[in-house]
Image (cartoon, rainbow, N blue to C red):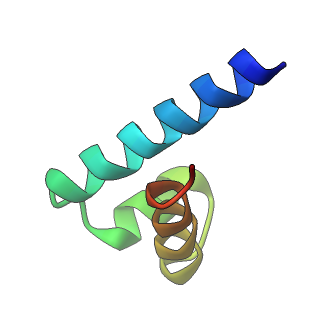
Amino acid sequence: MAALARTTVRISRAAACNAQADEVPWDAIGKSLGLTEQDARSRLTSYTFQR
């Protein structure tokens, strides 16, 4: 379980950082995740700072 948790954190952080580095518009991220722009921004920001 611990290994799965670490892998999930690492992958979600990488995905969030890549989306931001690629300058993907927040509305497009939100739409692809089925979220509002604000919720997508919040979620990706939280992924960026997970440990």
Is 9 left, or right, of 48 in this rendering?
Answer: right
Tell me residue 36's x, y (percent). 57, 76
Is 5 left, or right, of 12 in this rendering?
Answer: right
Q: Nearer the viewer, residue 30 or 16?
A: 16
Tell me residue 27's x, y (percent). 38, 72
Residue at 46% in and 73% down: 41
Furthest residue toward bottom: 38
Q: Quadrant of the N terminus?
A: top right
Q: Nearer the viewer, residue 7 or 38?
A: 7
Count of numbered circles in the view: 0
Residue at 36% in and 62% down: 28
Residue at 49% in and 33% down: 10
Tell me residue 16's x, y (percent). 39, 50
Residue at 63% in and 28% down: 6
Is 35 left, or right, of 47 in this rendering?
Answer: right
Q: Is 44 rendered above or below residue 16?
A: below
Q: Is 44 rendered above or below residue 1?
A: below
Q: Nearer the viewer, residue 5 or 23?
A: 5
